Image (spheres, rainbow, N blue to C red):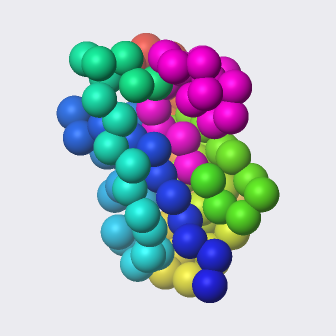
Amino acid sequence: MTKVELYHNDMSSCSQKVRLVLEEKKIRWTGHHMNLRKGETRTKTYIKNFNKNGVVPTLVYKDDIIIESSIIMEYLEDTFPQNALRSSNPANIAQMRLKNRKIDDVLH
């Protein structure tokens, strides 16, 4: 079985959002804790192979490398439909996306 891998940091609120989705959906995953103080996300290897922005979180599944926490959350919902966290109602989905955008653009 292909593993879901998450490059993250324990203190990153964006990483926390993704970890919560993984746990709520009961997805087995392997974590790679990145030490931000040591600059582990700013290495040439990490930037070239995983996240061109040099930040966490980054999700790897099969051949997919997904960055940005809100996008990762939607990817997980689409890829692993069990234990759905998103409504099937389009208006509710739009409201969810609006709230996520506010978090990303205003609060964070």
Q: Quadrant of the N terminus?
A: bottom right
- Nearer-the-camera pick, 73 or 36: 36
Quarter where residue 25 is shown: bottom left
Quarter where residue 78 is shown: bottom right
Q: Position of residue 47 (x, y in %)?
A: 62, 23
Q: Is residue 51 magenta?
A: yes
Q: Residue at x 72, y 64 (%)?
A: 62
Q: In this image, 46 relative to 24: left or right?
A: right
Q: Residue at x 45, y 32 (%)?
A: 56
Quarter where residue 89 is shown: bottom right
Q: Residue at x 22, y 33 (%)?
A: 11
Q: Is residue 100 above or below residue 105?
A: below
Q: Position of residue 53 (x, y in %)?
A: 60, 18
Q: Is residue 101 above or below residue 17?
A: above
Q: Is residue 34 above or below residue 28?
A: above
Q: Residue at x 56, y 71 (%)?
A: 3
- Nearer-the-camera pick, 94 or 70: 70
Q: Of all residues shown, which one is farthest toward the left?
A: 11
Count the marks. Answer: 0
Start and end of the magenta stretch? Answer: 42-59
Q: Of all residues shown, which one is farthest toward the right?
A: 63
Q: In this image, 98 relative to 27: left or right?
A: right
Q: Position of residue 29 (x, y in %)?
A: 44, 68
Q: Is residue 107 magenta?
A: no
Q: In this image, 50 relative to 28: left or right?
A: right
Does residue 59 appear in the picture of this structure? yes
Q: Position of residue 49 (x, y in %)?
A: 68, 34
- Nearer-the-camera pick, 101 or 23: 23
Does residue 91 appear in the picture of this structure? no
Q: Quadrant of the C terminus?
A: top left
